[in-house]
Amino acid sequence: MSVLLLTSITVFLAEMGDKTQLVAMAFVAQFGAAKVLGAISVAIVANTALAVLLGEGLSRIVPFSTLQIIAAIGFLGFGLWSLRCGEAEDCDVPGECKGNPFWTIFLAFFVAELGDKTQLVTLGLTAQQGNPWMVFLGASLGLVSAGALGIFLSSFIYRFIPPRAVQLGAAGLFFVFGTASLYSSVPAALMTPPIIALYFASLGSISYLILKKKVWN
């Protein structure tokens, strides 16, 4: 089997059901399938290029826990953004959000891929196969295909579920991913009941204010 085909299939299967695929699906209700696919494709190429060119991977240069914290902050931020957009009148229809969403989607997907298993798979295949260009092309193709499948399924789902409900569900997914990333990366000494309670109280309060249009009008 060629390096290109092997890499494409391996990365595609690794990406199925992954959080980054769900991130792509979550943005479809807000920005439309075409814009999301374009932005995540660029993010995939950039992230895969980093994985292949660095060789040893970002996780060897930056501690994995640091990457997880960065990803967690990104997820929480995009969750709040989803609440804001889900409540705004100009976001009632998929693809109707004002402004250019490219950088929002690009950054969300790029950050989500840092230290992700598909990035590690790409690094492993680069070292194993000794053909970085084919691994790069194969990994990019596999990731874009998985993202496109998720976007297609999202477009189908949105025919039966109101966009506002999907946007609120997307915010919930981002909060879950962000909280899980923080839980797995912050020092155990910080995982005390008062700090955990403060975290959830703060997140809940900010979300409530956004939904009541007291923030980001």
Image: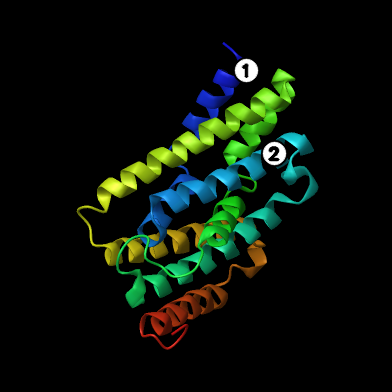
Residue 132 lies in quadrant: top right
Question: Is residue 106 in view from this perspective?
Answer: yes
User: Where does the image place residue 90, in percent across and percent down from the top left?
Assistant: 35, 73
Query: Is residue 23 in view from this perspective?
Result: no
Residue behind mark 2:
49
Quadrant where the C terminus is found in the figure: bottom left
Q: Secondary structure at mark 2?
A: helix
Kind of residue indicated by mark 2: Ala
Q: Amino acid at mark 1?
A: Val
Q: Nearer the viewer, residue 211 or 176?
A: 211
Q: Secondary structure at mark 1?
A: helix
Is residue 3 left or right of 201 when viewed as pictured? right
Q: Quadrant of residue 208?
A: bottom left
The residue sitting at 49% across, 57% down in the picture is 177
x 35%, y 69%: residue = 91
**Residue under the image location 65 percent in, 44 percent down:** 47
